[in-house]
Image (cartoon, rainbow, N blue to C red):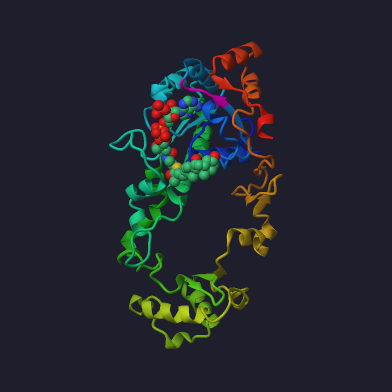
Amino acid sequence: MALSGVRVLELAGLAPAPLCGMILADFGAKVVRVDRPSRAAAVSADGDVQARGKRSLALDLKRPQGAAVLRRLCRGADVLIEPFRHGVMERLGLGPEVLLQENPRLIYARLTGFGQTGKYAKSAGHDINYLALSGVLSKLGRKNENPYAPVNLLADFGGGGVMCALGIVITLFERARSGRGQVIDASMVEGVAYLSSFLWKSQKVGLWNEPRGKNLLDSGAPFYEVYRTSDGKFMAVGAIEPKFYNQLIKGLGLNVDELPAQMSSFGWPEMKKKFASIFAQKTQAEWCSIFESTDACVTPVLALEDAASHQHNKERGSFIKNNQGEISPRPAPVLSRTPAVPSCKRDPFIGEHTEEILLEYGFTKQEIAKLCSDKAIELKNLKANL
Ligand SMILES: C[C@H](CCC[C@@H](C)[C@H]1CC[C@H]2[C@@H]3[C@H](O)C[C@@H]4C[C@H](O)CC[C@]4(C)[C@H]3C[C@H](O)[C@]12C)C(=O)SCCNC(=O)CCNC(=O)[C@H](O)C(C)(C)COP(=O)(O)OP(=O)(O)OC[C@H]1O[C@@H](n2cnc3c(N)ncnc32)[C@H](O)[C@@H]1OP(=O)(O)O
């Protein structure tokens, strides 16, 4: 796999850092999730739902012996992912200047909401706050309604987890030339703002001149909208270019010569009503068969489980099943020579691999026993979880 041999330490966090670690693991990195021991008794594998392919080490970073263990682990690692507010790692004596001095090849990835500097660097927040501060949230939502945050996909995962993974592979690539590591300051505000570069840079062509919900791509246009079908399901319409729009109109049984010009926004509200009343007359399956094999850019809105069993996705193997029968998306993108090979095993229990990992990083059995008696680490008793 593309990232074989890369050793990653991921300090356990909420949603974005776990995705970042999972991406690296899917593509072959050896990812160790560093968990808090105190949680081990209460939490098994279900706290982190993005733990595929990872192993767990339960380590108390608040104890000096625990922090010393992380320092030693970092000496033998390629990447550290830390998901805490600015200042937390410094308080633990695990800031970048310490760890990079001990291992100048280390990639020290700091995945936060607001970044390492600035007024909000030490403030708590979640996806919706980062999205708001990036300016993007102001553009999301329907006409005359409040801005709407679409689950926690954009800042947490797009601007956070994925952007941080990109930063890690970029720095690993650069390190192959320079031999040197560096610090990644991955702010989700900036990550999601960067993700929205098209939105920013397309302002000059007038794409966003109207208020929220009245523009071409934000549910203002009738040909870029979701419509309810007679069985309570939905169809997604994305017929932007005239040649595709004409096929949409044909499929709806309308005559393009009798309609207002496609790009005349004055006619859009009326056209939307017309399209909505037509879509409401047939079931989703009926609309699928009308638009199948056309270029009208009309697709069914599928539930997650239906997406996994849809013919197209099945043909490509877009979804995978693990040993527990859990279905999830296959890692993307697909690489021709060194594709990702996602683990089929169950997620790790907290502390399940503590001993195995420490031995692998050069600790002796005696050292491990001492760390255990000092409560710096925790060895999970697997039987307790079975
Ligand atoms: C919208 C999303 C958030 C979605 C979260 C949900 C996915 C989950 C939230 C609640 C979960 C459910 C719940 O737990 C109940 C069930 C539990 C069950 O097991 C599973 C099912 C549950 C229903 C469960 C399901 C889900 O998991 C939930 C619904 C987001 O936006 S996520 C993005 C958040 N932002 C960031 O990540 C940016 C950077 N981080 C931060 O800004 C802060 O970390 C944050 C997120 C604001 C939290 O602040 P906090 O004060 O808590 O932490 P920090 O200031 O960062 O400091 C960390 C302290 O912890 C110490 N520490 C860390 N590791 C260790 C260790 N190994 N040993 C010892 N100590 C450790 C560290 O030293 C810091 O201590 P100090 O504060 O004393 O310095």
Locate ligand 1 by image quadrant. Answer: top left
Q: Who's the residue at 37% across and 27% down the image?
A: 87
Instruction: Looking at the picture, tell me which residue is in the foreground, 116 or 18.
Output: 18
Q: Who's the residue at 39% across and 68% down the image?
A: 216
Instruction: Looking at the picture, tell me which residue is in the foreground, 103 or 144.
Output: 144
- Relative to residue 52, is residue 311 depicted above or below? below
Residue 107 is a magenta residue: no
Which image quarter is the C terminus in? top right
Instruction: Looking at the picture, tell me which residue is in the foreground, 21 or 327.
Output: 327
Relative to 339, 208 lies left or right: left
The secondary structure that most of the magenta stretch takes on is loop
Q: Is residue 163 visible?
A: no
Relative to 379, 189 lies left or right: left
Number of marks in the rendered image? 0
Q: Which residues are magenta?
A: 58-62
Relative to 376, 53 lies left or right: right
Dividing the picture into quadrants, the one containing residue 270 is bottom left
Q: Position of residue 13 (x, y in %)?
A: 49, 36
Q: Who's the residue at 62% across and 62% down the image?
A: 306
Q: Is residue 122 visible?
A: yes
Q: Position of residue 271 (x, y in %)?
A: 41, 80
- Relative to residue 271, is residue 119 depicted above or below? above
- In the image, farthest residue toward the right: 323
Which image quarter is the N terminus in? top right
Q: Position of residue 84 (x, y in %)?
A: 42, 33
